[in-house]
Amino acid sequence: MDIKKIKDMRTMEMQYQHNFRTKDVPNAIPELRDQNEELVKLSDQPGAPENYKEAFRQRIKQLDYYKNHKYRSDAVLALEVLTTFTKDVSIDIEQWKKDNVQWLRSTFNQAPQKYGDNVLSVMYHGDEHGNVHCHAFIIPINAEGRLNCHSYYGGRASLSKLQDSYAKAMETHGLERGVKGSSARHQDIKKFYTQLNQRIDIPRPREKESAADYRRRVLKQLQEERAASFREVDQKARALQQQADKTLNQERSAVMGAAKAEKKHLEADLKGLRNDITNAKKERETLTRENQKLRKRLSKDKDQYNQMQMQAQKILKSAEFVADIKNKAEAYDRQQAALAYARQEQPELASRYDKAMEDIQKIFLHHADRTEQSH
C-alpha cells in the first residue's frame, strides 16, 4: 500500500488520465484493457463528474464550510492510494477487490453519514502483466467537514500505520506485510525499457510472411517479453533490496537489543543510586529528629537544674534562718536561765528588770496602737 498527495489540478488531471487510460501507458498491454474495472465508479458520484477535477469541485461545493471559505492555496486536495500484491500469490481476486474497497472506505472516512463518501473512485488495473493493482482517488474531508490531509496521512510514521492496517485487512488472503522501513522501490519505467531494449532479440521476417503478420508477431513477442522482463527485473531488484533490508533490520535489532540491555543496566544502577539517596535522606531525617529530641530533653533538664538550684538556695536560706532562730532560741534560753538565777540570788534586781520590761512593752504597745490608728 502506497499513498501520495495531490496538491494541484494538473497532477489531478494526469492521475485521471493514467487511471482511466486516456493516454498511453508504456507498461500497460492494450489487449488486456478489458481486464480493468471501476470498483467505485466516478460517474456514480452526485452530478456524475467526468474526471477527477470535476469530482473534486463538486465535492467541495457540497460542504457547508466552503460556501463561505476558500481552501488554502497549499492544501492537499486529494490522495492517490495504490494497493497491490506480488504476482506469485494466488488469491480470490474478486474478494480481494471487495476487501480493498471496504478497507479504503473504513480508513478514509471519518464522518460519511454527515459529509458523504471521501472515496470517489477506485480503479482496478489488470492490463499490466503480473502486476494487478488498484488506484483510489480520495478527497480527505475530516470529521469537521474540512479538507485535512493530516487527519489521515501526515508522513512516514502514519504511512507505516496505514500499511500495518492494510496488511491486517489482507491477512484473510494469505498476504503478508512487506519489510518495515524497506528502501526497495519500483524503478522508473524508462530505466526498465533501457534494460529491456538491451536484451530483446527482434525476430527476422519469415518466408512469404506479410508485413501485417510480421508486425503482429513482433508486437506480441515484444509485449510478452516486455511484461515478463519488466516484472522479473523489478522483482529481483526488490527481492535483493528486501533481503538487504531484512539483514539491516536484524543488525538494527541486535544493536537495539544491546542498547536496551545497557539501558536496563544503567536504569538499575540509577535506581540503586536513587534508593541510596532516599535511604540517606531518611537517615538524616531520623538523626535530625533525635537531635531535636535531645535538645528538648537538654533544655528540660536545664530548667529542672535551675529549679533545683533555686530550691537549694531557698533551702540554704531556710537553713540559715533556722540556725539563726536556733541561736536566738538558745540565747533566749540562756537569758531565761540567767533571769531565773537572778530571781533566786538577787530578787530585787530581777524585780527591777521585770518592771523595766513591762514599761518597754507598754511603750511598744502604745506606739503600735498609734501607728495603726494613723493608718
Image (cartoon, rainbow, N blue to C red):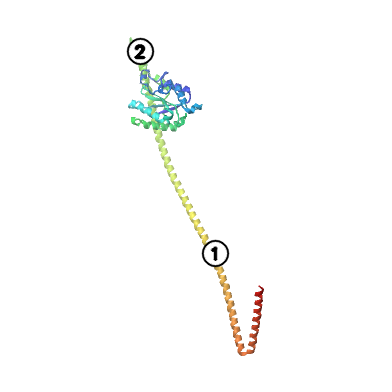
Above or below, comparing residue 294 to residue 281 in the picture: below
* Image quarter of the N terminus: top left
Give me the disc on residue 241. none
Above or below, comparing residue 328 to residue 293 in the picture: below
Above or below, comparing residue 299 to residue 2 in the picture: below
Q: Amino acid at mark 2?
A: Tyr
Separation of residues labelled 2 and 1 (CA atoms): 128 Å
Left or right position of 188 against 208 = right
**Residue 177 in view of the camera:** no
Residue at (48, 55) in percent of width and height? 286
x%, y% of residue 36?
37, 21
Q: Nearer the viewer, residue 274 or 112?
A: 112
Would you name the residue on which mark 2 appears? 214
Q: Nearer the viewer, residue 178 or 143?
A: 143
Badge 1: how crowded within 10 Å, few (<14), some, or many (20+)?
Answer: few
Badge 2: how crowded within 10 Å, few (<14), some, or many (20+)?
Answer: some
Q: Helix or strand or loop: what does disc 2 sit on?
A: helix
Above or below, comparing residue 136 to residue 277 in the picture: above
Tag 2 and tag 1, C-beta contact below 8 Å:
no
Q: What is the quadrant of residue 202 in the picture?
A: top left
Give me the disc on residue 303. 1
Q: Amino acid at mark 1?
A: Asp
Mark 2 or 1, nearer chain start: 2
* Image quarter of the C terminus: bottom right
x%, y% of residue 59?
45, 25
Q: What is the quadrant of residue 209 in the picture?
A: top left
**Residue 98 in view of the camera:** yes
Residue at (60, 87) in percent of width and height? 340
Q: Nearer the viewer, residue 147 or 308?
A: 147
